[in-house]
Image (cartoon, grey):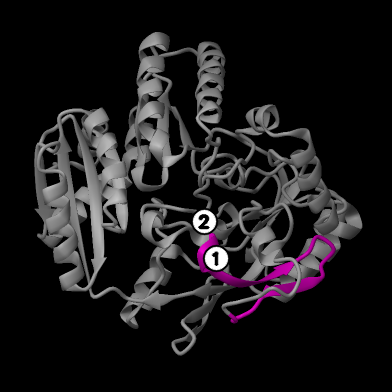
Amino acid sequence: MSSSVAELAKIITDTKRVVFSPAIEEKFLSDTLGRKKGNASALVFPVSTEEVSAIARFAYKNGIPLTPRGAGTNLVGSTVPHDGSVIVDFSLMNHILEIDKENFTAWVEPGVILEDFQKHVESLGLFYPPDPGEKRASIGGNISTNAGGMRAVKYGVTRDYVMALEAVLSDGRVIQVGTKNRKDTTGLDLKDVLVGSEGTLALITKCLLRLVGKPEKSLSLLVGFSSLKAGIEAVPQILKASLNPTALEFIERKVIKLGEDFLKLRFPADYEAYLLLTFDGSTEEINSSVKKLKTLLSETAEEIITLDDAELSQNVWRIRGCLVKAVEAVSEQEPLDIVVPIARVADFVAFVNKLEQKSGMQMISFGHAGDGNVHLCVVRGTRSEEAWEKELHENLSELYAEARALGGLISGEHGLGTSKRDFFFAETPAVNVELMNSVKLAFDPKKLLNSNISYVK
């Protein structure tokens, strides 16, 4: 431990909230998958903006990198420290500071857990729509990756619910971007620049979130199909019919089996593929949408099951929500979050199935059919480390190239992290990368904040 890093103990005097290497637990040196390991000189747990500002000033003065961390649920290495950085863990900054019912807003700290926040606002008759698969993620982490999730088809993504941010720049200055006002054309929207920046521009210390009224009712339906192709081809019909589903997911039977085995639960019916939908709103609105859906899919669907039993509905969604963890329990895998235009989802999934057959590498696909976000688990199986790395890179190159050819992108909601660096630079125009790095330098001239993330050169 260098003498300069030891000075952190003067900023955070509570010895339980500052840990120096080599006493840092391994979980703090990685992401939720635990395979990419970094190195850090210290781990700190601030409890206030003032402490974060002091830590940033100290790091800026001494040229020490900082790695922000929330709940550690990231899948692409965004929380992996590097170059002996100081990990700034926001888990103790986990307070809901204000709920403004009249203006439908909430001020929260970045360490607030999504699931806890949603339960709290719903108890007040309010609703926070963003709904990524990992409910134990932190709000700050959701904002840093612009998390999407299953309700994005109706409600949008995290960015649509961030009204303002308080943040600490790399030199320790505290800024606030955005306000409670619903409209703002007073200069560049710096708030939106920070959303999705994966901790590379500033350290978020407070978040002003937009809330909506809690829907009167929610109802899910499980639609069985004879093939995945038939299921995915039904999606544009559903969207064109203006049924406005809250969630619209596609899943293959072989994937559901993994989830069933993992949770020791069962789906209510066996078909080759499924669409899983949710409608919310008034009882009248939901009943109308369900009636239209059944008429629309009467000739293409094998069965439409109304999940009006609360326990059954919860279990079906639990199976859907655990799929990445279910695959991980069977084999090491690379979780992808490729996004393509909605009308090209069927084409992309068909390509995945052909590539799986050609390569011999198992590829499990599911995802958000309503917004084109295809989740893939590329499975290692029994491959040696050398074979896994070689074949994975080859297959990822083909998958990302096909997504690009269809007008898609390599990430819809997980972020770039350290995992997608080569692929990002391969497909992003040089002028775009140059502009991104100019923004990075404006916020962080010494490149101290998460500068191992993909877009930073």
Compared with residue 447, is residue 362 higher up or lower down, i.e. above or below? above
Image check: 212 left or right of 280? right
Residue name at image x 49 percent, y 49 percent: 73
Query: Residue pushed farthest front?
Result: 240
Say which amino acid is labelled 1: Gly
Element marked by disc 1? loop
Q: Residues within 10 Å of mark 2 (few under 14, many from 20)?
A: many
Quadrant including the C terminus: top right
Circles 1 and 2 in contact, beta carbons < 8 Å: yes
**Nearest the eye: 432 or 121:** 432
Instruction: Say if the magenta span includes residue 180.
Output: yes
Query: Residue pushed farthest bottom?
Result: 102
Image x and y of residue 307, in percent: 13, 55
**Nearest the eye: 62 or 8:** 62
Image check: 264 left or right of 433? left
Label 1 – label 2 distance at C-alpha = 7 Å
For mark 2, what is the residue?
A: 71
Say which amino acid is labelled 2: Ala
Compared with residue 201, is residue 406 higher up or lower down, i.e. above or below? above
Residue name at image x 55 percent, y 61 percent: 159
Stretch in magenta: 159-181
Q: Is residue 265 visible?
A: no
Image check: 235 left or right of 447? left
Image x and y of residue 301, in percent: 13, 38
Sequence-first disc among 1 and 2:
2
**Nearest the eye: 404 or 147:** 404
Image x and y of residue 77, in percent: 59, 40
Q: Is residue 81 visible?
A: yes
For mark 1, what is the residue?
A: 111
